[in-house]
Amino acid sequence: MIEGLSVTSLTAHYGAMRALSGVSLTVHHGEVVSLIGANGAGKSTLLRSIAGYQRARGQDIRLNGEIVAGLAPHAIARKGVVLVPEGRRLFPDLTVTENLKIGAETRRAGDWTLDRVLQVFPALTERLSHRPGQLSGGQQQMVAIGRALMSNPQILMLDEVSLGLAPKVIEELYAALPAILSTGLGALIVEQDIGRALKASDRFVTLREGTVVLEGASATADRHAITTAYFGAAA
C-alpha cells in the first residue's frame, strides 16, 4: 500500500478534447514532487482532477490505499488532499483571518493552527484585519497556502505558486517549504521554472500533451532530457 497519494491511469477530457491520458504518479508523505510542463500540458487539470473539481475517467486515485476518486471536493479535502489553486481565489470581502479560518471548515485533526500558520508566514501577522485587495501578490499567496494548511492536509497541492510574483517573494515562499513539510505531509507542486522545480523537490514528473513523458529523482535529473521532454524536441 502506498502511504500517501497514488494516481493510476487517470484520463480527463474537456468536451471532445482529451486533456490527460493515462497519467500515473505517487506522492509519499514527507516528500515534494514537482510537476513540470509547458502551458497546456495538463498540469492544472491533473491537480483539479485529483482534488475532485474536474471529472476524470478510468481513474484510480487513492490516499493511503483508500479510493478517493469520485468524491466531492469538500470530501476529498476532509480526507486530507487539498489544492491551492492558480490565482489564489481568496474571498475578497473577508479579512485575512476569516480567509484562513475558512480552511478549518474541512479540518482534520492535526498540528496546523492559526498561530502555526503565522509562524511560517510572519508577514501576515500585522495584516490579519486586512482584506485580500490590500495585500501584495506574495501576501495573498501566503494566505492561500495558509488557508489550505488550516485544514491539516496529508497532501498539499500547489498550482503555479510563483506565477506573477517577484523573484525575492518566490524565494520567500519556497523557503517556507521545509517548515510546512515538517509535519510529514507530502506536496505536489506545479512550477514552470525547471531549475526551481528541481531545487524544491525530491522527485519530478514531466507532462506533455496530457501524458507523463519523463520522471525521476530531482537531485540526479538530466536538465537536457527534461528540456527535451518539456518541448518534445531537442533544445
Image (cartoon, grey):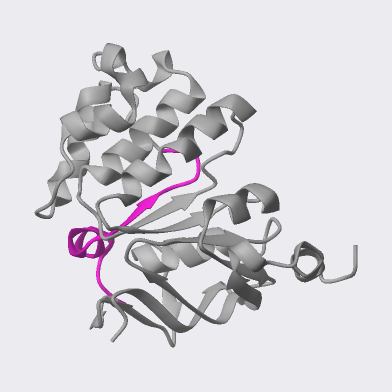
* Residue 170 location (% of width, % of height): 55, 33
Quarter of the image with the N terminus is bottom left
| Up/down of 170 relative to 217, above or below | above
Whether residue 166 is visible to the viewer of this picture, yes or no, is: no
* Closer to the camera in the image, 181 or 167: 181
* Residue 172 location (% of width, % of height): 49, 30
User: Is residue 82 within the magenta segment?
Assistant: yes
Q: Give the range drawn in magenta.
A: 69-88
| Up/down of 190 relative to 131, above or below | below
* Residue 167 location (% of width, % of height): 63, 29
Residue depicted at 42% across the width and 27% down the height: 140
Q: Quadrant of residue 233?
A: bottom right
Residue depicted at 25% across the width and 83% down the height: 65
Quarter of the image with the C terminus is bottom right
* Closer to the camera in the image, 111 or 95: 111
* Residue 11 location (% of width, % of height): 51, 80
| Up/down of 25 relative to 104, above or below | below
